[in-house]
């Protein structure tokens, strides 16, 4: 199943790379405020779905552009973001990814995050570790938050969380070495798994933004949870992650920012 997902991700990446050569010709439409979709998103998703449905016609699917597609049995569900970081892509900013995850009976089982611009392939299978281009990866070992580099994402689709986010941002800024907002949550989570970031938090994500990255972090020895330190991030969209030492410290700052009046 992981090999099938890898092949599907690479097919989508090839479509994205071809389109990136002349991105000004790509047709863009808006799904909502600061939320864009392109013909490339749709073509990449169709390539992924075609590959997965051919191999596993009985499986269910949850994809960003086409939504949920149920099957006779929901034992297996693929969670797909064909182009995470569409805004980056349409501006020629080379930070975006393909994200594919598989849930088995509600538990994350397989994960692929593919960066087509760098040809970096992050993969994980439950209980078997996480890898970058077939090399085992682990979360970082930094234990002092003041030495940690933390990733984040802005609540750009809905401004209702902006005040709470700004409070969180201030607390994290005060206590860490730096914050980075690159624009592809799936890739940010993969970077936590690879030790490039020591932690990551964001408000209001969708399941397809997080599913693959979450398994990568868990298999790389990291922690991931929602703002209440519960495993409900795929449902409520609020996520905190990090290495074992950074995670509880980052979670505390995020909780303080959320609760402060």
Image (tube, grey):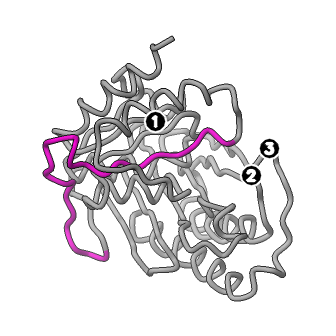
Percent position (x, y) of residue 115? 48, 72
Which sits earlier in the primary sequence, circle 3 or circle 2? 3
Residue 155 sits inside the magenta stretch: yes
Q: CA distance from mark 3 to mark 1?
A: 22 Å
Is 154 covered by the magenta stretch? yes
Dot 1 corresponds to which residue? 169
Q: Is residue 237 left or right of residue 198?
A: right
Q: Secondary structure at mark 3?
A: loop
Task: Give the class, few, some or many, for how many residues have Cα within 10 Å of label 2's Cα (few <14, many ≥20).
Answer: few
Q: Nearer the viewer, residue 13 or 95?
A: 95
> Given this view, does label 1 or label 2 mark the residue nearer the observer?
1
Q: Mark 1 or mark 2, which has the lower sequence index?
A: 2
Q: Which residue is denoted by mark 3 in the rendering?
A: 33
Label placed on residue 66: 2
Q: Which percent across, then down, holds residue 244? A: 18, 40
Residue 206 image point, x, y percent: 59, 41
Judged from the image, the secondary structure of the residue bearing numbered disc 2 is loop
Q: Magenta part of the protein: which range?
A: 133-156
Q: Depth check: 169 or 198 in front?
A: 169
Residue count near mark 1 (Cα–Cα under 10 Å), binned few <14, some 14–19, many ≥20: some
Up-down relation of residue 11 to residue 208 (above or below): below
């Amino acid at each position: 199943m992981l090999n099938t997902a890898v092949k599907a991700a690479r097919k989508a990446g090839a479509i994205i790379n071809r389109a990136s050569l002349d991105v000004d010709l790509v047709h863009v439409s808006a799904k909502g405020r600061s939320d864009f979709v392109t013909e490339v998103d749709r073509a990449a998703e169709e390539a992924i779905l075609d590959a997965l449905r051919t191999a596993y016609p009985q499986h269910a699917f949850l994809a960003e552009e086409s939504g949920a597609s149920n099957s006779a049995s929901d034992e297996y569900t693929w969670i797909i973001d064909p182009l995470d970081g569409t805004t980056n892509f349409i501006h020629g900013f080379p930070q975006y990814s393909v994200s594919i995850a598989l849930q088995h009976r509600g538990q994350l089982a397989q994960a692929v995050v593919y960066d087509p611009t760098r040809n970096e392939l992050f993969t994980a299978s439950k209980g078997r570790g996480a890898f970058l281009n077939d090399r085992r990866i682990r979360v970082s070992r930094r234990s002092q938050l003041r030495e940690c580099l933390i990733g984040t994402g802005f609540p750009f689709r809905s401004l209702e969380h902006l005040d709470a986010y700004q409070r969180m941002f201030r607390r994290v800024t005060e206590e860490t070495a730096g914050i980075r907002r690159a624009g592809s949550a799936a890739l940010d989570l993969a970077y936590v798994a690879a030790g490039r970031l020591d932690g990551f938090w964001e408000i209001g994500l969708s399941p397809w933004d997080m599913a693959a990255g979450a398994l990568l972090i868990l298999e790389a020895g990291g922690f991931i949870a929602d703002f209440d330190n519960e495993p409900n991030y795929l449902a409520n969209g609020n996520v905190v992650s990090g290495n074992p030492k950074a995670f509880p410290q980052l979670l505390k700052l995020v909780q303080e920012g959320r609760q402060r009046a």
